[in-house]
Amino acid sequence: MKHLKLAMLIGIGTLLIAGKSFGQANPFINVLPSNSGVVPVGTLDIEVTIGNTGPASTIPQAKLRPIIQVPPSVTFLPNAQQTGLPAGWTILSNTGSQLRVCNSTDPIPVSTSRTIILKVQGVTVTGPQTFSGNINFGNGTTCGAGTSVAGDLTTDNSATSTLQVIAPISVTVNLKAFIEGYWAGTNAMNPVLSNQGLPNPTSDCDSVTIELHNPTAPFALVNSTVAVLHTDGSVSGVFSSSVPAGSYYYVVKHRNSIETWTANPVLLSTTVYDFTSAQNKAYGNNQSEVEPGKFAFSRVISIRMLLLMVWITTTGS
């Protein structure tokens, strides 16, 4: 019995010693492009994360030699412009399509990581495009080629990210507005386009231009579209290119009425902005009451609106 217990203890000791000889350090890599749609001479950041999941040993300095590869649509900027390396890391080579770095003087302890920001430049990124990274190993002294660390799991020595640019989603602005000169009474306007012999349905009144302007001076134009104003005052402006979320002045332009702005910037959404419900829904109260409680874009400009237009003109917007 004593001999059996001794044999079991010796066996357990052997397992412990063997277990301690491997699985001590495990480097990993992740690659993540930070944005998309790079314009000519624009830049794109590539975020590379390199770390050590352990479980026991630090990865020595000069032991990691990761190589990052980018698609043909972009090119790594010159080394002098690669300012996103952590302390102790150096660039070993940069061919434009491939860039190799090394943890020259930066050992990586267990459960820690390093973030490297690499910059590329190029034409518009279309999708799908693949960015990749692979960990190669140094000799632990000079960043020259060497062997892997004890316990390395090869499954996380490489990483890819696929970037695809999705077509911009159109933005729709819904308004309700009446034009004083077209007022027909009973909460409606005349079908002007049809009356002029155009093949529009009698539910159409006329075409208007809808603009989005920045909420602060000089109130720059962000986007515009042409839409059909219906006889009931409804109109939907669809902006085909993407518009950043936020608040804007909605501006309505029409051939026979005064350019009219919302009283204040409006949060961009599909909620109907109703100019007709109150005179002060328009900047400078630039509306006339066409029947009790119903307001329409005036044919006579208000002093406040005139001052706004003068301000925009003089500030160059």
Image: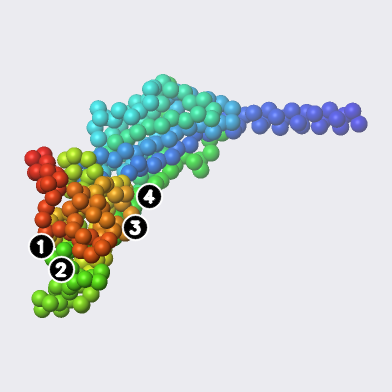
Answer yes or no: do the residues labelled 1 and 3 have beta carbons within 8 Å? no
Mark 2 vs 3, N-terminal side: 2
Find residue 182 and report its horizontal and vertical position in percent: 15, 68
Looking at the rendered structure, which numbered label has been put on residue 162? Answer: 4
Q: Which residue is mark 3?
A: 271
Most extreme residue toward the front, as rendered?
Answer: 292
Alpha carbons under labels 4 and 2: distance apart = 54 Å
* Nearest-to-viewer mark from 2 and 1: 2
- Residue type beneath disc 3: Thr
Query: Does 20 sit left or right of 146 as displayed?
Result: right
- Residue type beneath disc 4: Thr
Find residue 78 and report its horizontal and vertical position in percent: 24, 32
- For image coordinates 25% across by 69% down, the residue present is 187
Mark 4 vs 2, N-terminal side: 4
Mark 1 vs 3, N-terminal side: 1
Q: Residues within 10 Å of mark 1 (few under 14, many from 20)?
A: few
Query: Does 60 sit left or right of 286 as displayed?
Result: right
SS for callout 4: strand
- For image coordinates 66% across by 32% down, the residue present is 19
* Nearest-to-viewer mark from 4 and 1: 1
The answer to which of 203 and 190 lies nearer the viewer is: 190
- Residue type beneath disc 2: Tyr
The answer to which of 71 and 84 lies nearer the viewer is: 84
Looking at the rendered structure, which numbered label has been put on residue 256? Answer: 1
Mark 4 vs 3, N-terminal side: 4
